[in-house]
Amino acid sequence: MSHQPNDLQSILPNIADDLLKAPTVKDFANIGAATHAPRFLLLYGSLRDRSYSRLLTMEAARLLEAMGGEVKIFDPHGLPMPDAEPETHPKVVELRELAQWSEGMVWCSPERHGAMSGIMKAQIDWIPLTQGAVRPTQGKTLAVMQVSGGSQSFNAVNQMRILGRWMRMITIPNQSSVAKAYLEFEEDGRMKPSSYYERVVDVMEELFKFTVLTRDVAPFLVDRYSERRETRDLLAKRTNLNAI
């Protein structure tokens, strides 16, 4: 089914035809290619001395660094509960700066009462959807992982997927869920060889690929008709001399 451009208004009367864009392969032709190492922020969801979500996060960090990535792990110790302190709190500022710096993220939480931990959720809640004119997470890649004390479950990773979508992140298809995590790590904190470990390798490899593939084109991928329309309408209001 095809139509001439001058028929567009009759076909889609509620569309501003000058703002509707048909994406083509050519749209990617003039996009630059970053030369720096992919940047990853890793978050974990427990404050315990022997935190298995932290140990799993450290394994993920080693893998990403081995592939050539630049990795930073946020320490949630001292981060206040959301709204308990102002946004100028040093730990909040640190977390938000890291979120802005990153091109991809890994979220790793223990499962508690069938859900992600409060520590994990607090970190995500402190990352704003908007920061001025910037969306700190929009278009960034995301991998989700969880550890469980009992049998394998996917409640925490499923919840984090919902949050990733809400924050307009590109959440990769693969994920990791480590059951009976206390059996999967050596005394020195390193993860034992297992199918669980190999899944972590798979997930980090996939995250790295998606990040390299999308980081330069993310602004184009998340460009939206509704936001272009909103921007134009706001501009029209600001420049409407008849309203003065």
Image (cartoon, rainbow, N blue to C red):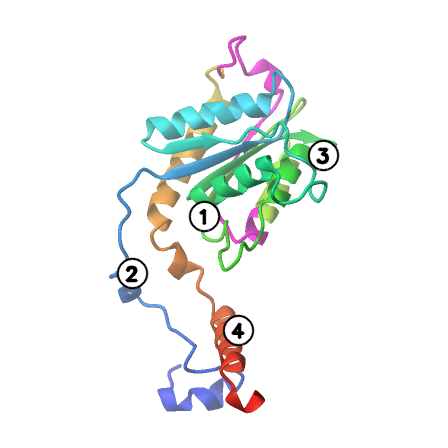
Looking at the image, which residue is at 41% across and 90% down? 7
What's under tag 1, amino acid-wise? Lys
Task: Out of 96 and 243, give the one closest to the viewer.
Answer: 243
Assess whether mark 1 and mark 3 are in contact (beta carbons under 8 angstroms): no
- How many numbered marks does the figure carry? 4
> How far, Cα to Cα, is label 4 from label 3?
39 Å
What's under tag 3, amino acid-wise? Gly
Q: Secondary structure at mark 1?
A: loop
Judge whether residue 197 can be spotted in this image: yes
Name the front one of labels 3 and 1: 1
| N-term-proximal mark, 2 vs 1 | 2
| N-term-proximal mark, 4 vs 1 | 1
Q: Secondary structure at mark 2?
A: helix
Assess whether mark 3 and mark 4 are in contact (beta carbons under 8 angstroms): no
> How far, Cα to Cα, is label 4 from label 2?
24 Å
| N-term-proximal mark, 4 vs 3 | 3
Q: Return the residue at label 3.
A: 114
Task: Out of 172 and 88, give the one closest to the viewer.
Answer: 88
